[in-house]
Amino acid sequence: MQRMGSARSVEITQVVEWNEGQAQRVEDYLAGEEPLEMRAGRRRLGVTLRTPGHDCELVAGFLFTEGIISRRAEILAIDAPGDTAQRGGMDNNVVRVKLKPGVRLATTGSRKFSAGSACGVCGKESIAQLRRRGIRPPDSKTRFDAEMLCALPEKLRGTQAIFGRTGGLHAAGLFRADGELVVLREDIGRHNAVDKVIGWALLQGKLPLAGHALLVSGRGGFEIVQKALAAGIPLLASVSAPSSLAVRLARELGMTLVGFLRGRRFICYAGEERITPGAFPAGKGSVTGDVVSPAISPAEWGKLK
């Protein structure tokens, strides 16, 4: 198996392709996947499986979205040999971070890079924890054009270099309100892709991300919403469905949450006031609380899905 690229993000391997009754040996591209360990001094903070590349951003984004740090100044240094390495190795899969004295790590002992699905009781506690962290509703002034939103998935796919070769990666793209792509990151893990985008913004001094939209290639789960809210992103869109807890969190903290963004159709689960007038039927209800008020009929919702 042959490595490609300095970030070891793509590999080439020999496979057997079966097509219309004929088998042949060909070369195929695979998305890279390697473990990454994050350490602060002698403390091991966690391990994740990720696509090599942008390790500094991944770790910075994780530290910020998990509430371990609250600002860029709390990271004194990050050493990520894997960002420049062209070959694998133990040292290339370890990121060492030096944090400002006073940053508390005691609460990170049970944390993992990616947590599992949460039950209803745990979900309520998770939302309460976010409030205790001081996460505030994102800016309410930005407006997003519905036609602009419909064009984002094509822009995202068109710039996914690794996905174009492998077909096996998640992507997260940060866009301005006018639809201009700011930064895109790919990873085998959808949470990692989001952390890389937010880590980029943190290291560039661009947080909070008022006036921006985040588009993810997978579903809009609770953790994705939580990470976007921590970064101050007012609109999160996905090409698939959000979870019930994600919708509840978006509504409680005032985020615009869009799902099933495909072609010229999408569903707005929360915060429809940020989408320019004319996108939704007027005077027939709105999406608030724990249930969706019937702005359109269930049959019409079914067609959208």
Image (cartoon, rainbow, N blue to C red):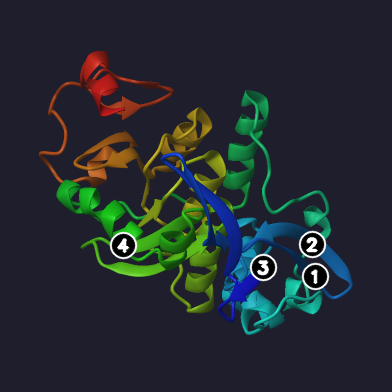
Determine whether label 1 and label 3 are within 8 Å by CB: no
Query: Residue 122: x, y in percent?
Result: 67, 31
In the shown orientation, is residue 12 left or right of residue 113? Answer: left
Q: Mark 2 points at which residue?
A: 45
| Residue 1, label in figure | 3
How many neighbours does mark 2 have within 10 angstroms: few (below 14), some (14-19), or many (20 or more)? some
Q: Which amino acid does label 1 sit on?
A: Arg
Q: Nearer the viewer, mark 4 or mark 1?
A: 4
Q: Classify 295 as above or below 154.
A: above
**Residue drawn 27% across the image and 15% down it:** 298
Callout 2 secondary element: strand
Q: Mark 1 points at which residue?
A: 39
In the rendered image, which quarter contains the C terminus?
top left
Distance Cα–Cα, label 2 vs label 3 = 31 Å
In the shown orientation, is residue 276 left or right of residue 173? Answer: left
Distance Cα–Cα, label 4 vs label 1 = 35 Å
| Closer to us: 304 or 130 | 304
